[in-house]
Image (cartoon, helix red, strand yellow):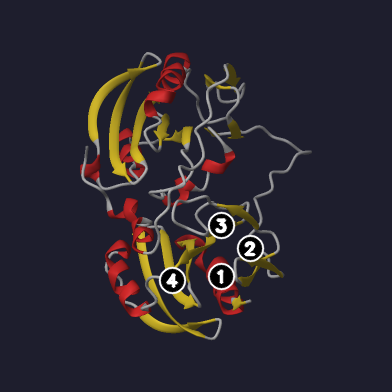
């Protein structure tokens, strides 16, 4: 096992506040397979037919259950026993090589990976293996960076939480053995169909209620529940455009520890020892910390206590669209009220 990454310990602080005997949800079984084939890219593979599928012209991804999607946003240490198969088609040129693709695909620090040569679909590839011990069992991942030709690369990511790698090992092997490479689709002139980008966050706000609070969010955002051990309630407010631009509200039992200063200080290491700044949330004294786990991803976390509950509010946004997201997110934070 490689050492535990800071990015992976974001939810460890929950154990400071709560204990739970809940064994949590069960990972679903594989109920047979079906074949995905895309005529435009040529990508083809077999996958579990009862998994939740999402596709674009250059991406294919399935989750063992929709409940598991949000766990891959933050890589929480507790939650649904999620697993996913994720295949991306990436364009290359003389400046963006297979090594560049591999380096950019690493979500964690380079020393987290064991890198070896491999062959997938008859093509040369780099195999990256990574694993971490979490509260609810081992997290395992494998990533294959495949050089299809001088202009195309494919990235296959196979990941499983809570010791479910062995449960899904046959499914993952089925993906690799059935895989046929994809290439960037050729653009065709089309005078009828127009590709419309997913919308930016709406300027119109709507009120959403949670456990002991209300918050206004853009009316084109939806709330996804994020089951997580030790959290009384977790809601992920997210739009269609980007999975890395969202507002997450976690409600945690603070009946045994109501010293906000100490809670924040104990959790600073999780957020790269960011500097806490005093602020107000819903009229209550609060702290915020700004941090980043990647060059293009920026984040801010707020801590506030009301009664016997700790509210942890996390906002994430893409640096390249900060002007579109951050003002709206700050408006949401300012609208936060306790019921």
Spatial CA distance of label 4 from label 2 is 36 Å
Mark 1 and mark 2 in contact? Answer it, CB < 8 Å. Answer: yes
Q: Nearer the viewer, mark 1 or mark 4?
A: 4
Closest to the observer, 96 or 127:
127
Q: Residue at x 67, y 66 (%)?
A: 208
Mark 1 lies on residue: 329
Mark 4 and mark 3 in contact? Answer it, CB < 8 Å. Answer: no
Q: Earlier in the sequence, mark 1 or mark 4?
A: 4
Q: Is residue 149 visible?
A: no
Q: Determine crowd level at label 3: few under 14, some 14-19, many 20+ residues with C-alpha closer than 10 A.
A: many
Q: Determine crowd level at label 4: few under 14, some 14-19, many 20+ residues with C-alpha closer than 10 A.
A: few
Mark 4 lies on residue: 255
Q: Position of residue 114 (x, y in %)?
A: 22, 33
Q: Earlier in the sequence, mark 1 or mark 3?
A: 3
Q: Position of residue 231 (x, y in %)?
A: 47, 58
Q: Earlier in the sequence, mark 4 or mark 2?
A: 2
Q: Earlier in the sequence, mark 2 or mark 3?
A: 2
Q: Position of residue 234 (x, y in %)?
A: 53, 58
Q: Position of residue 160 (x, y in %)?
A: 41, 34
Mark 3 lies on residue: 236
Q: Residue at x 28, y 42 (%)?
A: 133
Spatial CA distance of label 1 from label 2 is 9 Å
Mark 2 lies on residue: 201
Q: Residue at x 47, y 51 (%)?
A: 228
Q: Residue at x 36, y 62 (%)?
A: 292
Closest to the observer, 236 or 14:
14
């Amino acid at each position: 096992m490689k050492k535990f990454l800071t990015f992976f310990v974001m939810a460890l602080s929950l154990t400071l506040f709560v204990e739970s005997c809940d064994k949590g949800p069960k990972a679903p079984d594989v109920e047979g397979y079906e074949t995905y084939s895309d005529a435009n890219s040529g990508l083809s593979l077999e996958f579990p037919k009862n998994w939740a599928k999402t596709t674009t012209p250059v991406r294919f991804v399935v989750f063992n259950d929709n409940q598991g999607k949000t766990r891959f946003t933050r890589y929480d240490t507790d939650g649904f026993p999620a697993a996913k198969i994720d295949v991306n088609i990436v364009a290359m040129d003389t400046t963006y090589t297979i090594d560049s693709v591999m380096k950019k695909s690493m979500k964690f620090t380079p020393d987290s990976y064991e890198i070896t040569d491999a062959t997938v679909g008859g093509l040369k590839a780099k195999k990256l293996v990574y694993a971490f011990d979490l509260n609810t069992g081992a997290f395992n991942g494998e990533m294959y960076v495949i050089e299809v030709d001088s202009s195309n690369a494919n990235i296959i990511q196979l990941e499983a939480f809570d010791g479910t790698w062995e449960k899904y090992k046959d499914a993952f092997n089925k993906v690799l053995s059935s895989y046929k490479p994809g290439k960037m689709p050729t653009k065709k002139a089309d005078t009828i169909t127009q590709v419309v980008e997913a919308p930016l966050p709406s300027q119109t706000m709507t009120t959403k209620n949670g456990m002991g609070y209300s918050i206004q969010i853009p009316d084109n955002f939806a709330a996804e529940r994020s089951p997580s051990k030790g959290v009384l309630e977790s809601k992920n407010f997210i739009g269609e455009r980007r999975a890395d631009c969202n507002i997450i509200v976690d409600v945690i039992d603070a009946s045994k520890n109501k010293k906000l200063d100490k809670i924040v200080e104990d959790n600073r290491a999780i957020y790269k020892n960011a500097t806490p700044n005093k602020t107000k949330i819903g009229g209550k004294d609060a702290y915020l910390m700004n941090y980043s786990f990647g060059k293009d991803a920026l984040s801010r976390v707020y801590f506030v206590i009301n009664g016997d509950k700790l509210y942890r509010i996390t906002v994430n946004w893409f640096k390249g669209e900060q002007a579109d997201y951050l003002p709206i997110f700050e408006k949401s934070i300012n609208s936060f009220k306790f019921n």
